[in-house]
Image: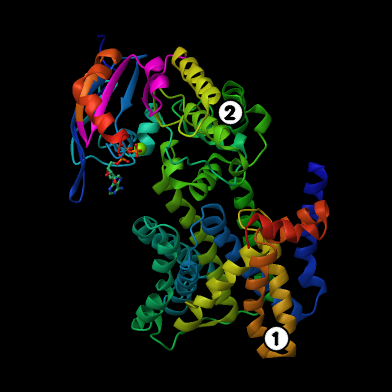
Amino acid sequence: MKNLQRAGLALLAVGLAAVPFVASDTLVQFGINALLVATLTQGWNIIGGFTGYPSFGNSVFYGLGTYGTAIAMAQLHLPFGVGLVAGGVLGVAFALLFGIPILRLRGPYFAIATLGLAAVMSAIVATIGFAGKNIGLILPLFRGDTLFYELSLVLLVAATGTVAWLARSRFGAGLVAIREDEDAAQVMGINTTMYKVGALALAAFFSSLAGGIHAYWITFIDPGSAFDPTLNVRMVIMTLFGGPGTIFGPVLGSFVLSAVSEVLASKVSTVASLFYGFVIVLAVVFMPKGLLDLFQGFRHSGFRYFAQNMRRFRL
Amino acid sequence: MTAPIFEVKGLTKKFRGLTALSDVTFQVAPGEILGLIGPNGAGKTTLISLISGTLLPTAGEIHFEGRRIDGLPAFKRARLGIGRTFQVMKPFPGLSVLENVTVGALFGATEGQEKKRAKARELARELLEFTGLTRHAEQRADQLGGPDRKRLEFAKALALHPKLLLLDEVMAGLNHVEVDEVVALIRKIRDRKVTILVIEHVMKAIRNLSDRLLVIHHGQQIAQGKVDEVLADQRVVEAYLGKRRQ
Ligand SMILES: Nc1ncnc2c1ncn2[C@@H]1O[C@H](COP(=O)(O)OP(=O)(O)OP(=O)(O)O)[C@@H](O)[C@H]1O
Ligand SMILES: [Mg+2]
């Protein structure tokens, strides 16, 4: 069974890697976006799903990765690889610096404290000449969707591999304990501060690299698109939709939602904007534990699964 | 008395205006069971929180195995071997009973011993057996009944390999039979050479268990010593009867 699963996953990865060689340009471009968003979602899963800290600051990590890469390439004329590292360092440094004070807050207080971060960062960046003020930066043009696609896929696989490690490691057990009850975690010997900051830094790492790849691919960035709070909202919804605290749920959730919203957007745009709102309400009421749990529960008890959920969570 | 494993000197805790604990001083010998009693709001839970590190004292010192620990964060004290239960129980609700206990084994006092999950799970299974929870191992913690939740608090605290165990009203809400079971469990734990500080309102149990008693009233330490002597003390009787007959 385990080997079968492994073989299936390997096959899936190979299949995904083959997409740019067989699919249309539009599909590949959709794929790059979907892979990067899935990586962001997986990053949110680490701090939100595993550790239980509902961060709205993850779009800042993404934005810093974007700007780190863009400044290195557009202003300092450094190669892409160096730019990516610069973006990653910026994102992780921010997580370490701000994580320590902000992670002292719990639950809704933490969420509110992180809520304003993206707007503040966007305003700050818009005043820095070196970062292109509010006009933004243009990166050197590089046409190579296949490369961007494969790079995004590698990043997603790395993020998912990290989450798989969390699910079986001592570190991951500590994060889950913090999510379940932080006071109890403390008196059981868990260095909660270090663990929380570590989780945030991991999330920042993957988010800022996704930002860096996206910046070079799209070749133009500005404060508004780099520090976009709605991007963070999507990470939250996709994680919750797929199954927070699981290995594959967030990836599945973001693939499904990316695809559905793409289809809707091409038909009627007003419907697309309402779409996420509906998803939140439906997901919370009918499957508060996400898609993965839905599949397992549905196999087990059919439509009664929904009724059980409503009873279990007193909805 | 042999050299104390644990010692508190002039411990004081103020919550803004309110003095919850004032100048408390006592020692505990290795392997001893010290009973801590006092009316509601006396400051008992506050004392346990100060010792375990979830609260920091306003003044005073705490020494454990000859080392001053009142400045250490809670997780370090846990790793030194101080385990506690919570009066308002704090299981990891979404995890199975086995996983709950495994966490303690992964992070507890035996550095480097149980860092592998499989090893920690093995130890956790032993503790489930010890506390009578084996048949609930795979159940979610928030689906346990009251008495089993208390057992889970025990098992989690024991997974740390504590040398000092702080028990906060682990018998509240239990019937006679269940109380007797818990008393037997605490004795079994003491037989493992664990020193125990136990807060309890159930008088019969505390009388049975304790080697010595410490009485707190309005944050003041009003009596300390042999069980019978303390219970006969005039101030203790007044503190209790004054409260009970309202
Ligand atoms: N975090 C806190 N902030 C402010 N006041 C507190 C806090 N914790 C406890 N107190 C107050 O300190 C006093 C002692 O409380 P504590 O919980 O230690 O009493 P207790 O002896 O454990 O009582 P009980 O038998 O009811 O459990 C009470 O007056 C309580 O209201
Ligand atoms: Mg109390």
Seen from the viewer's position, the closer of residues A93 and A57 is A57
Who is closer to the viewer here, B157 or A71? B157
Q: Is residue B58 left or right of residue B198?
A: left
Q: Amino acid type of disc 2?
A: Ala
Q: Position of residue A215 (x, y in %)?
A: 54, 76
State the residue position of label 1: A265
The secondary element bearing badge 1 is classed as helix
Relative to A48, residue A210 above or below: below
Give a yes or no on whether discs 2 and 1 share a subunit. no
Can residue B24 be seen here?
yes
- Quarter location, residue B212: top left
Q: Position of residue A217 (x, y in %)?
A: 60, 77
Q: Is residue A138 visible?
A: no
Residue A137: x percent and y percent? 46, 83
x 22%, y 36%: residue: B219
Chain on which label 1 sits: A
- Callout in the foreground (2, 1): 2
Q: Specify the quadrant that holds the N terminus of chain B.
A: top left
